[in-house]
Image (cartoon, rainbow, N blue to C red):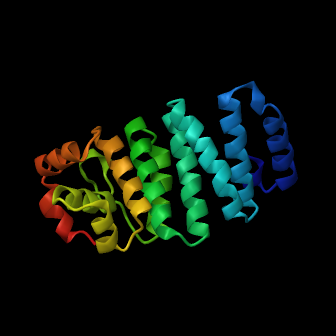
Amino acid sequence: MATTAGDSALARSAVAELSALAELGPVIRAGAAGATGALRLAEGDPAGALPELRAALQVWTALDIPYEAARTRRLIGQACGAIGDQDAARLEWDTCRAMFARLGALPDVSAVDALLGAAGRVPAPAPGGLSAREVEVLGLVASGMTNSAIAQKLSLSEKTVSRHLSNIFSKIDVSSRAGATAFAYQHGLVQRQSSIT
């Protein structure tokens, strides 16, 4: 995008043209929303970028286009980090890193690792591509804790815990807490969760 080359005027013009074509279909609509969000982020408006990026992510996810969904999550993480929500930023980066890894997009994995390293957290390998925080949440789920109790224990909002669970279910391909608990026991994550900070 032109913003990476430092040409904001050209980027704004390209985004306007793409947005004008958005009614042609969901792919163009998602591309336009993502480009608008990326432009706002590059111009120093991360809060204004988030609704556009989340709209793009919703379309990429519905269309089952994981690479674009992962790229959008990386930008959402950058926007969250820029507004001071480091936990949400790490959640997005952990998720997109796992998606990139599954797709074999190694340069993208490296780029996300750099973001995570800059945020003070180097990812540790875990079964299913789970992040350290997801392993912690999964261990607490397996121990029988409710979302509310997990949120209180980890000083998170219940919404953040729910998002972690949704990502966990997706990564390990289960649809229930019982399935997630079985996965945790099969992979020895119940014991590991107490040692993760």
Q: Quadrant of residue 117?
A: bottom left
What residue is shown at x 56% (from left), y 73% (from top)?
84
Given the current orientation, which residue lies at the most extreme top position? Answer: 24
In the image, is residue 145 above or below residue 32?
A: below
What residue is shown at x 15% (from left), y 59% (from top)?
190
Where is the C terminus found, in terms of image quarters? bottom left
Horizontal side, residue 37 vs residue 158: left or right: right
Q: Quadrant of residue 29?
A: top right
- The spot of residue 44 in percent (x, y) is 73, 65
Horizontal side, residue 91 vs residue 53: left or right: left
In the image, is residue 31 above or below residue 129?
A: above
What residue is shown at x 83% (from left), y 55% (from top)?
8
The foreground one among 151 and 95 is 151
What residue is shown at x 46% (from left), y 40% (from top)?
105
- The spot of residue 192 in percent (x, y) is 16, 63
In the image, is residue 69 above or below residue 150?
A: above
- The spot of residue 178 in percent (x, y) is 19, 45
Horizontal side, residue 47 vs residue 149: left or right: right
- The spot of residue 86 in percent (x, y) is 49, 69
Q: How many marks?
A: 0
The foreground one among 102 and 148 is 148
In the image, is residue 117 above or below residue 96?
A: below
